[in-house]
Image (cartoon, rainbow, N blue to C red):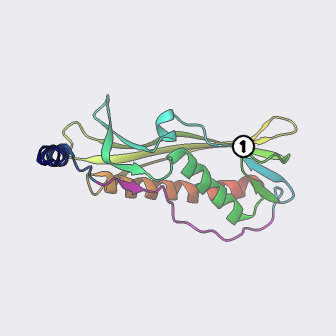
Amino acid sequence: MVKIVFIILSVVLFSGCVMTTTPPMNEYRVNADLSFSALSEGKCHKKSLKVAQAFSSNSLKSLKMKYAQGENKLFSYSQSQWALSPNQAITSEVMTLLKDLELFSSVQIAKSVSRNDMLLEINIDEFMQYFSADAKSSYVKVIISFTLLDTHSKKIVATKTFREKNSVALLNADGGVKALNASLRNILLQSSIWFEGVCR
């Protein structure tokens, strides 16, 4: 009996020694933190719009938060990740923008079975934090393209690419996320003016 108790205690103590505590993962959101008022009616007001899921690299479809250093090195933050992939989050932000602007009669998600007059394609070319080779400075680069198509004629109505490059104040994931969100905010502000011009 004593021998059995000793074996059980030994197993419990040994298990406690080999267990390691995993540091908590910090989750960050892509959040432009914008709200818009409805714009004046234009030629798009009687047309319905479907917003396609954004095209992007596979890395932007993941929750892993990546950053680049120098020209060729790509890494992932070990203790930080996205709460929602940038691809999904940016698509959602564009949806919110277009619904707030009320330029179209309705704005539908990509999975909607409804037929729509127009289709918006989003291409996320860049959404990344970069560090210098010596890791003493950092910046973010965001490049997003929009293409508006007429679903009946299959012709492109308008297309536009927006670019933002901003320095990062804090040389870590938190600083990168703040700069990325600020860059996305600027792009959405610019795109709202563009959408209004297209529908004027």
Tell me: residue 32, above or below residue 50.
below
| Disc 1: which residue | 158
Q: Position of residue 167 (x, y in %)?
A: 33, 52
Q: Position of residue 4 (x, y in %)?
A: 17, 44
**In magenta stretch: residue 189:** no
Which quadrant of the figure has residue 194? bottom right
Q: Residue at the far front: name it.
A: 1
| Residue visible at 19% across and 46% down in the picture | 8
Tell me: residue 133, above or below residue 16.
above
52 and 104: which is toward the camera = 52
Tell me: residue 38, above or below residue 177.
below
**Residue bounds of the magenta highlight:** 24-41
104 and 110: which is toward the camera = 110
Indicate the secondary structure of the residue bearing disc 1. strand
| Residue visible at 72% across and 50% down in the picture | 109
| Residue visible at 82% across and 53% down in the picture | 48
